Image (cartoon, rainbow, N blue to C red):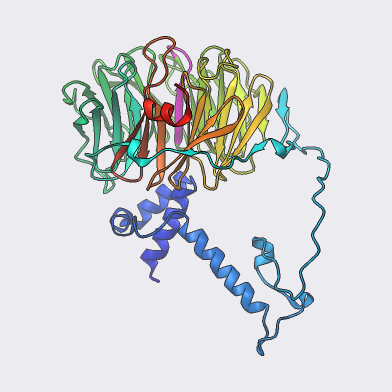
Amino acid sequence: MNSDQVNYLVWRYLSESGFDHAAWSLKVEMRNAEQLDRIWANRVPTGHLIHSLQKSLLFDECLQQVDESGRLKEESELEGLAPALIPVAPIVAQPKPQQSSSKKPSGENGYANGDIDTASKDVDMTDSITIQGPRRIPKSSIVTLQGHAEAVVGAQWHPSEGNCLATCSADGTARVWDLASGKSAVLNCLPCKTPDKTVTAVCFNPDGSMVATGSFDGAIRLFNKTTGALQSRPITSSTGPILSLKWGRTPETCLAAGADGLVLAIDTRSAVVKQKWQHKMAVVEVEWISDALFVCATVSGSLKLVQVSGAADAHVREFAGHKEPINSIRWHNKMNLFATASDDSTVKVWRADREAAIKTLQHHVAPVQQIEWAPPTAIPSDPDGRVLVSADRAGVVCIWDAGRASLLHVLKHERPVPCVAFALGTGLLVCAGQDGKTTFWRADDGKQQLEAFIDHDVQFVAFSPVTEPGKAASALVLATSNPDVLVLPALALEAQSGLE
C-alpha cells in the first residue's frame, strides 16, 4: 500500500463521517484527490477504512489468543487491543452464562450549564424505534437526471415552481433543471483559480428569476434563471471556498460566507459587495432572521447576530454556548427562534435578544451535523411547528418538541446521517445516509414507513415547495456523490406508503 492509497482512504473516511473541514484541508494538501477519486470511487466501498481496521484488530486479537503451539490461552492470559476498542468476546471452550437483561436505573445527566431548560441525555431507550420490514421503494420509481460530469454537491428547489430545481457540482458547473422535460440549462462557473473547480453552493433569489453560485476558489456568480446568462463579472472578494450562500427575503441582497472567514453582503442589482465582515475563523453558515439581520457561525463555535447596513465589522450581539464548530443554523419564523447544531453533540435553541441559549437539547453522543424545523403544515399534530429534528455522525436522528425541550423519538441508522428533510402535507421525515440508504419515517410517531437504496452516498435531500394550500410536496430531490441527480416523485411515495 502506497501513500496515495493511505491518503485516499483517510480522506474518504473524513468525508463520509462529516468532518468536512478536515477533509477539505487534507484534499488541498493531497493535490491529487480528485484524480484518485475518479479512479477509485467505485472500487472502494463506503466505510472501507473502518472495516479494514476492525478486521485487522480482530485478526490481531485472534492471534494473541493462541500460543505458539496452537493452544487456546486462558482468559487471564489474554492481552490485546480489541477489548479496549471494540466489543470482542474472548475465545473460550465453555459458553458464558447469559447476563441479566434488567435495566439499570438512570442516573443524573451530569450536565452543568446556565441555560434555562435542558433535555436530559438519560432517555428511556425503549423509545428508540426498530421496525421490521419497511416497504422498499423500487429503483424504477426514481427519475435520474443526467448532465453533470462529476459529483453533485448541492441543490435547491425553485421557490414557486415545483418542476424546477438548481444543482451544483464538482465539474465546475451548476444546472437549472426542468423536470417535465428532463433538460437543463448549464451555468458555467469556469475558469477557476484553484485546481479544485467545485461549485460549492447554489441558491435562487426569492422570486426565482436569478441563481447565485459560490465556488471553491471563492468566486460568486449571478445568473439569469431563464437564459442561463451570467449577469456580471464574477465577484472575487473571497479567497477561500464559499461554504454558505443565502439570498435575503428581498431580491436585492445575497449573503456569502467563506472558509477565509469573510462574510459578504452583495447588492445583486449592481453585482457589487456593499458590506463585508471579517472573522478570525471560517464561517460555515449564515441564516437570515429578518430583512436586515442575520446570524453567522464559525468553526470555533462563535455565533454572532449581524445587521446589514450597520458599521463595518460590527455585530449586534455575540451568543455564548457552543465550544466546538457549529454545523447548522435554522430560523423559525413563527416562534422567532433559531436553533444550532454543533460538534459538541448538543442542539441549542436561541432568542435573538438573549446571549444565552433558552434550551439545550442533549441526547446525541456524536457531533450533530444537521437540524431542521418541521414546517407548520408538515405534522398534523404539531400546528405550531415546534418539532425539531437533529441528525448526528453516529447515525442517530432525534425528534424533539423544542418548545418543551423534550425528546419524542430516537431513530437509529447504521451510518452517519448528513441529510434530513420534512415533506409538507404527508407527515414524512426523510433521512439520507452516507451509505446511500434513504429512510422515510412518520414524524408524529417515529415509525419507519419506507426505505430506498441509492448506489452512492447521499449528500443533500429536499422536498419541492408546496405551491397551493392543502397540497403536498410534489417530489424529493437527492444529490449524491455520483454525477446523476435523483428525483423521487410524490406519486411514487404515495403508492408505496398508502398516503393517497
Q: Is residue 286 magenta?
A: yes
- Of 353 and 250, nearer the camera is 250
Please report the residue visible at 39 percent of the width from the left and 16 percent of the height from the top: 466
Magenta segment: 283-292
* Rendering quarter of residue 386: top right
Residue lying furthest top in this view? 469
Q: Return the x and y of residue 382 as percentages of the image width and height.
A: 59, 16
- Residue 429 to residue 351: above or below: below
Quadrant of the drawing holding the C terminus: top left
Horizontal relation, residue 75 to residue 385: left or right: right
Q: Could one spot residue 333 in this view of the protein?
A: yes
- Of 308 and 47, nearer the camera is 47
Horizontal relation, residue 474 to residue 362: left or right: left
Most common SS among magenta residues: strand
Q: Return the x and y of residue 138 as percentages of the image width and height.
A: 38, 40
- Residue 7 to residue 78: above or below: above
* Rendering quarter of residue 217: top left
Please report the residue visible at 74 percent of the width from the left and 76 percent of the height from the top: 93
- Residue 475 to residue 413: above or below: above
Q: Is residue 263 magenta?
A: no
Residue lying furthest bottom in this view? 69
Horizontal relation, residue 2 to residue 349: left or right: left
